Image: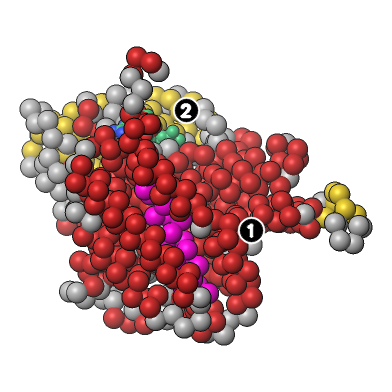
Amino acid sequence: MSYNAPLSDMKFLLKDVFHADTFWPYFPYINENLDLDTAFAILDESAKFSSDVVQPLNRNSDEQGVTFSSGEVKTPDGFVECYKSFSESGWGGLCGNPEYEGTGMPKMLGVLVDEMNYSASNAFTLYSSLTAGAALCIDSHASEQLKQTYLPKLYSGEWSAAMAMTESDAGSDLKNIKSKAILISDDQYKISGTKIFITAGEHDLTSNIIHLVLAKVQNDERISLFLVPKFLNDSSFNHVIASSIEHKMGLNGSATCVMNYDGSLGYLIGEQGKGLSCMFTMMNYERLAIGIQGLANSETAYQLAVNYAKDRQQGTNPVSKQPCSIVEHGDVRRMLLTIRALTEAGRALSVYTGLQLDLSKYGDKVQQPIASKFSQLLTPVTKSFFTDRGLECTILAQQVFGGHGYIRESGIEQIVRDTRIAQIYEGTNGIQAIDFLARKIVHDKQIVLCQFVEQINSNMAEFEFVDQKLCSLVMKNFKTLIDLASVISKKSSSTLSNSCAVNFLDAFGYNIYGYFWLLMLEKAYSSNQHSCENKQYLCNFYFDQLMPNVDLHLKRLQSFDNSIMAMPIENF
Ligand SMILES: Cc1cc2nc3c(=O)[nH]c(=O)nc-3n(C[C@H](O)[C@H](O)[C@H](O)COP(=O)(O)OP(=O)(O)OC[C@H]3O[C@@H](n4cnc5c(N)ncnc54)[C@H](O)[C@@H]3O)c2cc1C
């Protein structure tokens, strides 16, 4: 299988849809040499690296997997060399803080590079993705001394990182964690406990692994965050021990470890008792990254399926009555168009979210607070909508292959297996939806949602090329969502938010994709893109075939109350 990065779509988004170069010159800390040509050159290089260096390892990484022996984890053949080359090429510190030797590139560019890497190999990319997320957390919350010691080596790829939250009795609900921290001096603690499911907790890619561990300080029920290196500064072993690895449905090249911290030295990050909010910096980063995993898999699945559909001869063309390739059949076209329409809209949302993250960090005093709220609002949407649609898209692509899609040789079944986890880890998609509705909307009294919708509506009011009836439909749906959120708020019941959250998020997701389709079409026409024709076909398909999902989810939202909670627990 070969992967061709969708570079022209990516460049179209940066240049014509979001006008990235109008923001960059005003962002402090963004690499001062950055302009569109440089950004495009970075995308071109990333495309080459992901397709020529990373992607060829993906198949074997699934077959061979990681192996475990006496506490040591060996990654699949080629991973060590590839990680070295990835790091030496500077990809690890791409969006890192330049004060600590990061490259200082904006996130709206970073999301596209992430997409290419995930398309090339989910398993390989997780190692660097966790490292970048941990670095962001350290940069945002750790002491100056910790930043100076750890950030340059994390950005350079000499060291990597892991996120250690989950325990056997603490998954979605982290307040039950049992890992303990005992103060020794200043900000130094001895950490003890067992964490499960820790991605990249142990491996052979880097000389040190930096664990960000959630634990409770003795006699304090609140959660704190600690930086626990596998090796200390004097190179002594810090009793960070992998006791086993998991055998999984997919993602076989990614080490998922049970980790024991046995009186390991740890440094407090942020204030004692504020560990969860510090960890949220990393979690939110990873949530967007994992959303992009779903999106990236949809793209790869599309490429595989469309090539197969053009080659595979089966049946006859209904008009010419001649034998034909399956791409000529309406049902196969439906599947391919669904994947493509969802993926291109998702990519637009991912770049938009990247822009909000950049504005929240580097924007002016007016932009920063708004963008920060918008990125918080959108994070659970990108995580769960991208990954739910991601699984659907990879399964549709597998369906295009018929029976051949069920056979390992086709390559598509690996993508289905690898993408499944993205709906589960980094907070299950159910939990994301509850976060979106209950915390980000109801608890906020719909204020940010209304501000966000207002911005979208005022953008659409200026559209000149697209059908205004479609804009009105998107606006009407947003209004219904705001009204429903207000009804749910008034009932102020967490059971209610819990049971209708997924439908709320899905209605929002399909509707915002509708907006991004109109935005892309508008910009394709106004900038005279050669892609206008395809964007028009895909936008028409989206509004005819996928936009009706908004109505379905809105309808479910209006009737969830009785049917979901009615049956007594003992009747299950
Ligand atoms: C391959 C893999 C890699 C992972 N990597 C990491 C990692 O690097 N670091 C790390 O810390 N963790 C990691 N995890 C753990 C992962 O994040 C958790 O498995 C996930 O958050 C869910 O927790 P759980 O498995 O305990 O499920 P549970 O919390 O037991 O949830 C079970 C089900 O109940 C639902 N549920 C739970 N509570 C509620 C509620 N209040 N309302 C509605 N529904 C609810 C959930 O949505 C889910 O459907 C990984 C897991 C896997 C499988």
The nearer-to-camera label among 2 and 1 is 1
Does 493 sit left or right of 286 as displayed?
Answer: left
Query: Mark on residue 337?
Result: 1
Q: Is residue 556 visible?
A: yes
**Crowding at label 2, few (<14), some or many (≥20) Cα neighbours within 10 Å?**
some
Please report whichever mark, 2 or 1, sits nearer to the chain's N-terminal start: 2
Query: Mark on residue 246?
Result: 2
Does 262 sit left or right of 520 as displayed?
Answer: left
Residue 477, compared with residue 312, is above or below; it is: below
Q: Is residue 152 visible?
A: no
The percent position of residue 275, horizontal first and vertical second, equals 18, 42
Q: How is the image coloured?
A: secondary structure
What are the residue bounds of the magenta stretch? 502-521
The percent position of residue 503, horizontal first and vertical second, equals 40, 45
Query: Mark on residue 252?
Result: none
Residue 67, compared with residue 5, is above or below; it is: above
Going by the numbered disc 1, the residue's amino acid type is Leu
Figure quadrant of residue 318: bottom right
Going by the numbered disc 2, the residue's amino acid type is Glu
